[in-house]
Image (spheres, rainbow, N blue to C red):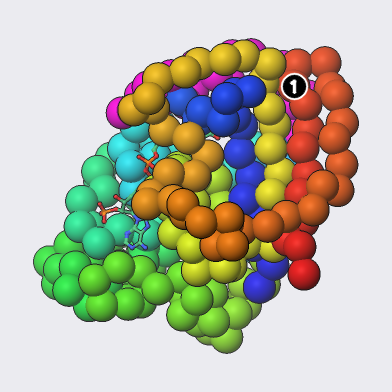
């Protein structure tokens, strides 16, 4: 599995204007060609994954709106299974896979999702085991590349399991601040440098509205 973290961040690494807020206002700083870049990247991968909070705050479609029939499989991990039924990923006709846990699964909620032709996978006991998930995606869903679009909690979990191959950031030239805000990677963090996840710089490309930063896992 090739896993890419793909995100729009401020200079100070924030993903949004404050915890619990949608990241959509940040997108007003991009122009059409920037949005096209994001969408066409979605057309290059087999799957796209965001955390449940991102569904609740942003209600993204997670589709490729610039190319016909090139939408990735949408994957949402959740232990609570409380994704709003009117969210785009559950309400539209596109393919969505909800991944939950042994202890989080709820037969009624699973039935409701399946009636909407959404797929459900159990992976892990109390939290989704992303290594196991990636293995199942490759073997059972023909998914060999995945783009992970955040937020900070989901990103932490995939970095912590050492599953990220590359990072692509569209860094907006703004500072947002806020000590409780969401950043590219939140979670527990590492207070010892030897545990920090290490990447190599591949490219730093100035664009009109942002800087494109590309990193690859250091081997
Ligand atoms: N700028 C950008 O590019 C961008 C992109 C995406 C999101 N965002 C912003 O990021 C914020 C949301 O980030 P966030 O860190 O609060 O939340 P998040 O990462 O979007 O979602 C966290 C939730 O996902 C589920 N999850 C993640 N890992 C799991 C695991 N291993 N097992 C089971 N469930 C798992 C859990 O749901 P349960 O509670 O059900 O267990 C968890 O509470 C929003 O404000 C959004 O606007 C910005």
User: 45 or 189: which is nearer to us?
Assistant: 189
| Magenta span of residues | 17-37
Question: Would residue 173 be found to the left or right of residue 74 on screen?
Answer: right
**Residue, far bottom:** 139
Question: Would residue 138 be found to the left or right of residue 55 on screen?
Answer: right
Q: Which residue position holds label 1?
A: 210
Query: Within the image, what quadrant is residue 124 found in?
Result: bottom left
Instruction: Kindly tell me whether mark 1's CB lies below 8 Å from ligand 1.
Output: no
User: 9 or 86: which is nearer to us?
Assistant: 9
Determine whether 95 is above or below 38 in the image: below
Quarter of the image that includes the C terminus: bottom right
Residue at image coords 61%, 32%: 8
Question: Would residue 153 be found to the left or right of residue 47 on screen?
Answer: left
Determine whether 3 is above or below 143 in the image: above
User: 59 or 12: which is nearer to us?
Assistant: 12
Q: Secondary structure at mark 1?
A: loop
Query: Within the image, what quadrant is residue 20 found in?
Result: top left
Question: Would residue 123 be found to the left or right of residue 144 on screen?
Answer: left
Quarter of the image that includes the N terminus: bottom right
Residue 214 belongs to magenta span? no
Residue at image coords 87%, 42%: 203
x and y percentages locating residue 71 in the rendered image: 62, 52
x and y percentages locating residue 138 in the rendered image: 60, 79
Residue at image coords 63%, 23%: 11
x and y percentages locating residue 103 in the rendered image: 17, 74
């Amino acid at each position: 599995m090739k896993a890419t973290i793909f995100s729009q961040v401020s200079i100070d690494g924030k993903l949004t204007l404050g915890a619990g807020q949608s990241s959509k206002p940040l997108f007003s700083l991009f122009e059409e060609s920037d949005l096209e870049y994001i969408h066409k990247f979605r057309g290059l991968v087999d799957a796209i994954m965001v955390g449940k909070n991102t569904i609740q705050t942003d209600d993204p479609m997670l589709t490729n709106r610039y190319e016909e029939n090139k939408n990735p499989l949408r994957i949402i991990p959740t232990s609570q299974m409380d994704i709003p039924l009117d969210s785009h990923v559950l309400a539209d006709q596109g393919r969505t896979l909800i991944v939950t846990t042994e202890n989080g699964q709820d037969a009624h909620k699973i039935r409701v999702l399946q009636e909407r032709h959404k797929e459900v996978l159990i992976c892990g006991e109390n939290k989704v085991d992303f290594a196991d998930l990636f293995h199942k995606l490759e073997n059972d869903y023909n998914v060999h590349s995945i783009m992970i679009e955040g937020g900070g909690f989901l990103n932490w979990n995939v970095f912590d399991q050492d599953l990220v191959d590359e990072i692509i950031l569209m860094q907006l030239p703004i500072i947002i601040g806020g000590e409780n805000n969401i950043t590219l990677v939140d979670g527990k963090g590492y207070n010892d440098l030897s545990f920090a996840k290490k990447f190599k710089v591949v490219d730093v490309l100035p664009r009109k509205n942002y800087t494109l930063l590309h990193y690859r896992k250091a081997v």
